Image (cartoon, helix red, strand yellow):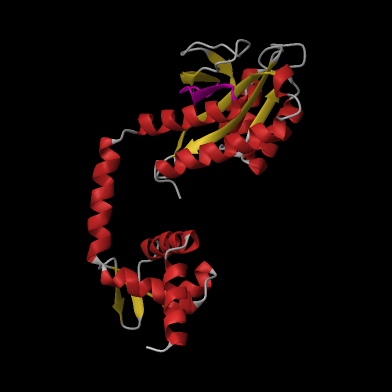
Amino acid sequence: MTNEAQDIGAAEERRAGSPQSVTRVIRLLEALCASNEPVSLADLSRRLGTPKSSLAALLRGLADEDLVVASDGAWRLGPGAFGLGSALTEARRRLQSSDLIREGMRRLCERTGETVLLAVGDHEGDMVTYVDLVESRNVVRYSVTIGDRRPFYASAGGRALLATCSPEAVSAYLKRVAPARLAKTTEIDPDALTQAIEQSRIDGFAQTVDQAADGVTGTASVIRDAAGGVVGALVVAAPTERAQGRLDELARQTLEEAAAISRSLGFR
């Protein structure tokens, strides 16, 4: 082998072990999982925005492990992929959803330094209930008890959950509940609430300042399961005085962790 060929081989080996290549393998397998038919190299390149030469090298490596197989000039999942899927399903069964959610809540509590809650809606759709919490270690912190309830319209978790509903359902809810003032600055105007909920739908998170109670700021984003269903709202609750000046940071951290928990539950 010439020195030039050795250099090229070494470069390809380094690229194959790079974090970018790992990400490409995951996206490649996801693309094949989503297709009912074998997918050509050109189609995979177009879907993933990756050069065909790079994908071809990855496919060859996956084929060596039977994770993919060639079929009439295209590629599909191989027997190794289904075996891996079965193993992952069994591991997922052993690790309960509640454990995965609580692990994410702990991470978010560590990142923000604030109390983190899991909020779910009731059957009537008028209130949210806090079903789990990881409490901040700060001496001054937001305190809540599991089982406490808050109106949808005045809480970050409630607004995040409402944002997953149709505009018609949101309108019907606001007409039914007749919002009341719970704090000095609670928003009770239906038009303003509709606009806030719609903004939450666009942003992917809801944020309230002194709405359900004076001095409390909430930031929430929805957690979804493998089927795309809403599991609940991940909520960061902080004293308003400490939250001011870092509202954007709290929103970003909550969004990121809700997305990470959703991925761990199988949502794509």
Which residue sits furthest bottom? 2
The picture quadrant where one finds residue 28 is bottom left
The picture quadrant where one finds residue 138 is top right
Q: State the image coordinates of residue 231 (x, y, percent, origin top left).
A: 45, 33
Of residue 56 and residue 157, the one placed in the foreground of this image is: 56
Q: Is residue 123 left or right of residue 140?
A: left
Q: State the image coordinates of residue 83 (x, y, percent, origin top left).
A: 22, 57
Q: Is residue 34 visible?
A: yes
Q: Residue at x 48, y 19 (%)?
A: 133
| Relative to 177, residue 192 above or below | below
Q: Is residue 158 visible?
A: no
Count of marks placed on residues: 0
Q: Residue at x 62, y 19 (%)?
A: 177
| Relative to 263, residue 8 above or below | below
Image quadrant in which the N terminus is located: bottom left
Q: Is residue 184 magenta?
A: no
Q: Is residue 121 magenta?
A: yes
The picture quadrant where one finds residue 96 is top left
Q: State the image coordinates of residue 218 (x, y, percent, origin top left).
A: 64, 24
Which residue sits furthest front? 3
Residues shaded magenta? 113-126
| Relative to 76, residue 163 above or below | above
Q: Is residue 199 left or right of residue 10?
A: right
Q: Residue at x 51, y 69 (%)?
A: 47
Q: State the image coordinates of residue 192 (x, y, percent, origin top left).
A: 76, 29
